[in-house]
Amino acid sequence: MASHRLTLRDGDFTLREVTWADCRRLYDWRMHEKSRMMFRHTALVPYPEHEALLKRYLLRPGRERWFAFEAAGVPVGSVGIADFSEDGTECEFGRLTVSPEHRGKGYGTRGVRLALEHARADGVRRVHVEIHANNVPSLQLFHTLGFVEKGRRVDGERTFIRLEMELP
């Protein structure tokens, strides 16, 4: 199956595009009970649907990117870049997950930093993200990186905070 083969490094920390070999771990991270509740869509997705989604991503060229990040060669998390503006200067970060056993070690911050580096090099000048209001670790991560709150969106009983960052 095709891969985009983009890789960025920061010492022993690597951001690389996802591959088919990541399929099971991406599913487990995203469907973990503590992770799933923080996403826009909280339903438990059947594994075959997840496989089909990853296959479609890997087979179609496009601007959207899904990354895995590794610490010393061990996969520890993932993040995606999608929803580009027509001119490519704006996008949304999403699908941020850190493996439950690796949370609290700064890996999410390192992964997002490298993804921002990629976005900047790709011509993006503004990045936004929507984070569940109860997802304090992610809110702190994005605030630490310089994102600022631009609004809130209520979806039923759930509130999401929109954060944005201008890239130099």
Image (spheres, grey):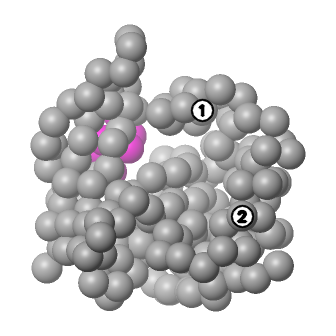
Going by the image, does 132 lie left or right of 56?
left
Residue nearer the viewer, 66 or 85: 85
Between circles 2 and 1, the one closer to the viewer is 2
Q: Residues within 10 Å of mark 2 (few under 14, many from 20)?
A: few
Residue 143 seen anywhere in this rendered image of the structure: no
The segment highlighted magenta reads 136-141
Image location of residue 76, percent across then percent down:
63, 60
Does residue 38 belong to the magenta stretch? no
Residue underneath mark 1: 36
Q: Is residue 89 left or right of residue 61?
A: left
- Residue 124 at what x, y percent from top left? 27, 76
Query: Where residue 107 sits in the image (x, y, percent)?
Result: 49, 61
Q: Residue at x 81, y 36 (%)?
A: 46
State the image coordinates of residue 8 (x, y, percent, origin top left): 50, 86
Instruction: Residue at 21%, 30% (x, y): give it.
Output: 152
Q: Is residue 118 above or below residue 45?
A: below
Secondary structure of residue under mark 1? helix
Disc marking residue 152 = none
Magenta: main secondary structure equals helix
The amino acid type found where label 1 is placed reads Arg
Q: Are marks 2 and 1 in contact (CB under 8 Å)?
A: no
- The one nearer the camera, 41 or 132, is 41
Label 1 packing within 10 angstroms: few (<14), some (14-19), many (20+): some
- The residue singled out by tag 2 in the image is 56
Quarter of the image that includes the C terminus: bottom left
Identify which residue, 97 or 56, lies in the foreground.
56
